[in-house]
Amino acid sequence: MSELKHPTSDQPAAEATAGTDASTSTEWLDRLIAAKRTDTAAGREPYAAHLDKPLAEGEPTAREVLDRFDPRRANLPDLTPTDAVRYIETHAADRPWLAPVRGHDTAVQRLFATLDQGHGHALERHEGYPSDSLLQRRVQYLEDPAQLDLTKRLAGEDAYKPGKDHQCAEVATKIGDPEAFATAFARGMEHPDVRAVLDQPLRKGSPPSPVAIPIGELLGADGARYCSGYQLRLVGGDIKATTDCRTAWVDAYRQGREPDAPAPIAVPIDNFQNTTVRFVFAPDRAKARYEVFTMYVDPPPTEEDS
Amino acid sequence: MTDRWFWRNNPDAPFATLLRVVEVHCHPESYDTAYEDLIDLARDPEPVEEMVRFKEQLREALGDPSRLPDGALFQAASFDDGSDEKFLRRLWRDLYGDEVA
């Protein structure tokens, strides 16, 4: 079984124990955040430096969009800025996807806090919290970054579907900067296609289709610089065979069998130009309207798989 | 550049209803109870119009999966069944049980 490598062997120690430390110390959290800051951010100016620049002349700045973000218009629970900051401080240790935003702009903290109280999982799977390593392991081994029980994460159990396997497409991506993520979400809430969904009442039947918005419309021309992710390396030039082989390999590995499929390999996505940000909808908690269940960058297909 | 999600903008495109419903309920990034909700919608004794069309198109696709636009079903669902046909068969079984397709 030369291909079989223990799935924890390339996992940083701080990350492997993220959210699993029973002590009240937040030292592990600070180590985790420091590790993530060096992750994909090298050579990149934080998006916070762009908050006062409009996307185009006459357009609102990111700060203006963040300041006027109204959680109620996103069908999310409302929080005052003070309550939001308190929420982040209180829960950063047990909900580590809130930790990267501690001490940031209040409007950004408020957006994170309200989003965390909603129905969706964008923060824990598609913002800065999942490191490159966690993203890679998500797409390669079907491990859910949101799963804070390490044993369950390694076993592939979904954080929000107890007892069920986590699923992942052939790519896993993030917007790894709190200000960039918050700006993309807040601008998305003002986009007419998103508004058309959020302003309608819940109806019987399937929720509305996802909405895809070019990243430039949300973050500007340099928006792609804030994105990162991994994709499966194709098996036999066939994407369907690739995901099939991944699942077969992971299932065999977890059951202690010799896999009869090649080990999955995930490689960094090197091109986020012309990417779109996808907003996926779900019924809100009150089952009265829709809310954004998740928001993530969806890179264009490579020449290899298009 | 080909529109990867042509069914969103063209509800009259071939298999557009099938692809829309599959995208909303079967994609790995869909909401937590999306697949269970689809099962409920499919088994509703008074199905909404969209689910009637969905069932017709699912049955049609099962009859000849090669009629599906190339790559569209995977684009919608990112499934791991290995082929369009295997995915469609699993979907039919989960939604409609032993009913003849």
Image (spheres, rainbow, N blue to C red):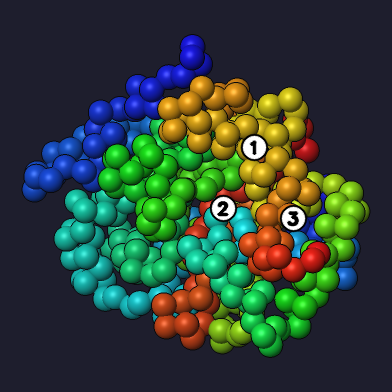
Residues marked 2 and 1, same chain:
no
Task: Give me the C-alpha separation between circle 3 and circle 1.
Answer: 15 Å
Looking at the image, residue B14 sits to the left or right of residue A18; the answer is: right
User: For the residue marked with disc 1, what is the amino acid?
Assistant: Asp
Q: Establish if A267 lies above or below B95.
A: above
Residues marked 3 and 2, same chain:
yes
Of residues A198 and A14, which is closer to you in this image?
A: A14
Of residues A229 and A152, which is closer to you in this image?
A: A152
Q: Secondary structure at mark 3?
A: helix
Kindly identify which numbered label has been placed on residue B88.
Answer: 3
Q: Look at the image and tell me whether residue A127 can be seen.
A: no
Q: Secondary structure at mark 1?
A: helix
Q: Residue at x 89, y 54 (%)?
A: B64
Q: Establish if A3 lies above or below A124.
A: above
Task: Give me the C-alpha separation between circle 3 and circle 2.
Answer: 16 Å
Q: Look at the image and tell me whether residue B84 can be seen.
A: yes
Between label 2 and label 1, give the one nearer the viewer.
1
Percent position (x, y) of residue A2?
49, 12
Q: Quadrant of residue B16?
A: bottom right
**Which class describes the residues within 10 Å of circle 3: few (<14), some (14-19), or many (20+)?**
some
Query: Upstream in the sequence, badge 3 or badge 2?
Result: 2
Chain holding disc 3: B
Kindly identify which numbered label has been placed on residue B28.
Answer: 2
Q: Residue at x 62, y 32 (%)?
A: A245
Q: Quadrant of the C terminus of chain A?
A: top right
Percent position (x, y) of residue B95?
66, 67
Residues marked 3 and 1, same chain:
no
Q: Which residue is mark 1?
A: A244
